[in-house]
Image: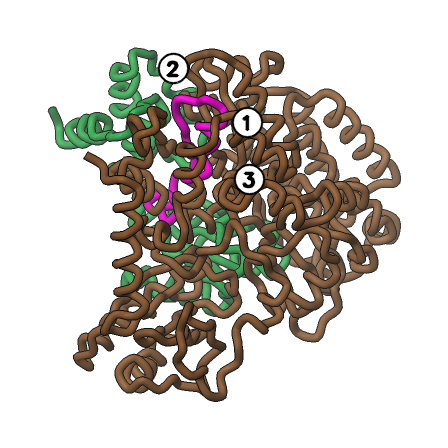
Chain colours: A brown, B green
Amino acid sequence: MASSFVEIGVEAARRWEELVAGDRPWIRIGTALCGEAAGAFEVATAVEAALEGQGVSAQVSRVGCLGLCFAEPLLDVQLPGGHRVFYGNVRPEDVAEIVSAHVSGGTPVAGKALGYLPGEESDAPLPDGIPDLNQHPMRVWENRIALRNAGNIDPMDIYQYIANGGYKALNKALGSLTSQETLEEVKASGLRGRGGAAFPTAVKWGFLAGNPAPEKYVLCNCEEGDPGAFNDKNILESDPNTLLEGVIIAGYATGASKGYIFIRHGHNGPIDRCRAAVNQARELGLIGENILGSGFNYDVEVALTGDSYVAGEETALMEAIEGKRSMPRYRPPFPAQVGLFGKPTNINNVKTLSYVPEIVSRGGAWFADIGHDTSTGTAILCLSGSLRYTGMVEVPLGINLKDVIYEAAGGVTGGRALKFLQTGGPLGGVLGADNIDLLLDFEVLRGAGAIMGSGGIIAADDTTCIVDLTRSLIAFCQYESCGKCFPCRMGMSHLLEVLERICCLEGTGEDLALMRNIGENMQAASLCGHGQLGFNPVSSALRYFGPEFDAHIIDHRCPTGVCELPRFSPAQSRR
Amino acid sequence: MSGLQQRIHDAVHGQTQATVTVLSSLLAVEDELGYISKEALEFVAEFSNSTVNDVWAVASFYPNFRFEPPTEHTVEVCWGASCHLVGAMGIFKSVLEASGMGSEGDRPDGRLTVKLNTCLGACSQAPVMAMDHHLAGRVTPESAAKNVTDLLETESHGV
């Protein structure tokens, strides 16, 4: 028998109080994929060994990603009732001192600290000689909505989510809003899909809500194969309950009977944490039969796919859940009529659904106030490449892309100059360095030949070659073409062949016209976005860097010398 | 039932999620055996009331499936755009040299598989590689070669 939401909330608050103001310090270690790659597991092992070796008692949590990936491995120490003091780029050999001086001795190691974040309701004096982490360039631009808990809570503990306001929105929707009123709230927010197409979420939900079928599905797409984008996996690793609550509310608003969260096989961090959230939510009666006594029945399942980029396309995703090859379907019929297992279906991206709990809690108008014009809310950006501060930031839409790159991300590393940004994944585009004075807005970016896509922004410095990058992007698109439709399957192969030739400095005068011709055919005749957008990397590169292509083709010279280095592509294409 | 068949049987029947399909069964076998054997194709076909041909159609589509027993270790190098722009090609060259291999694939002595991966998901730590699925970021050609050597000599996934 599930407890009432009030009882669950009381228990969650008690447990949280114990963590932040009990009698033991609390150590949190960032262990998302970014932390793992930087050595966080080794640091976590060192922390456990140091605590045991020194006989110090502390609570240790493996949390997700705070966004400051450049500083991983990142750990922080919070003394009972005190503030959080962060240590960045921690090596296992640094841990013993942090434990003895700070965890045990109560004095932060100021020389090694990255910054502090004030503890809620803490009246402890601020730590001496340690900067306020909220003043870090990467954090000052932020407005964390979907990422509000990322890096702060243990993703494997649903009570920590609930103690921080989690499932209040679900309780509110089920207790005091009708399905239609819930949908109206999302409509008022102006929320648009964050998977790439930027389609109004409430309109999409309305298609499903309007279908009277008894069995209907909500799918959450965390396929996320975009190189350069890791925000979906990061949300699942940092705060899977935010997403899960969004999936449940989407089910309530659309009258669906079941939700699926769809993740690529092999990404064990996101999969394990998401499954733990689903199981814990079921135990607490937040999914299943008669949720919170409302009469609403809804279950959620985590489904896995094999490696396939195209499985992120909504109809291909349904094929994969059904256990088939992830190849797109013909439309019509559209998913809201005939979707997964032939039932009406709605599909949203992880980020889109992760906004929903806060929208329902605080009201659609609150969300609509953030952002710019019809691009409401925030953008969750993944900053990678040659940037000083790489990581993940959640910033209001409408700020200037230039500020994101030169302020939040601290500009280019190694004293080099920025050459271009690659945005929106492999089907997105590039922006030349002189053309990034742009507002972060779906329409503005599209007009500039780049797209927001899933939020990946990769910075390239002036030692990189645009032709080489374009070849690499098309090699990815060719490798990932599912092979169902001819224009994409052959078009990608043909484009790659031409680009290989240009990179070998053996291009001919007709090659650019040939690529444009192939691209036009792909755009006009491909079945799904993979082929329709597949020429974007080439067309946007040509738009900003035509002379560099000419140097390769006409002068048979790579200005940066990159094309003279060895290069590799996967041994075989998919088919 | 042979040991292999028993493991296939248990993996397929051990699935706990509600939606069990050809693909989910193949993934369960892959997790257990590290590859899809001929027996597995036949078993999944019978289990899912379809043909070996249908199961092969799914298995051959997804490049994460392999059809030979796995080697001892797998080293993957990410060639996503973030990694590519900060030197993934040089990392891959170094990994191949340290492995004594000329291209992607299995080493003939069965000790090592070297693969390119489309994106390992830790773009902020580019360039990234993985030793037996343990990620290592900000690698250099030198540290990448050392990671391979350490893996083969000491079974260490050290970062």
Specify the quadrant that holds the N terminus of chain B.
top left
Q: Quadrant of residue A450?
A: top right
Q: Nearer the viewer, mark 1 or mark 2?
A: 1
How far is the residue under mark 3 from the one under mark 2? 39 Å
| Mark 1 secondary-structure assignment | helix
Circle 2 residue: B53
| Residue at point 34%, 22% (across, down) | B21
Q: Nearer the viewer, mark 3 or mark 2?
A: 3
Q: Residue at x 28, y 66 (%)?
A: A60
Residue to which mark 1 is pinned: A314
Across and down, in percent, residue A497 comes to: 70, 37
Query: Does residue A326 show up?
Result: no
Mark 3 lies on residue: A352
Cα–Cα span, label 1 and label 3: 14 Å
Foreground: B129 or A82? Answer: A82
- For the residues labelled 1 and 2, the Cα–Cα distance comes to 26 Å
User: How far from the left and from the top, in percent, is residue A202?
Assistant: 60, 30
* Disc 1 versus disc 3: nearer the observer: 3
Residues drawn in magenta: A244-272
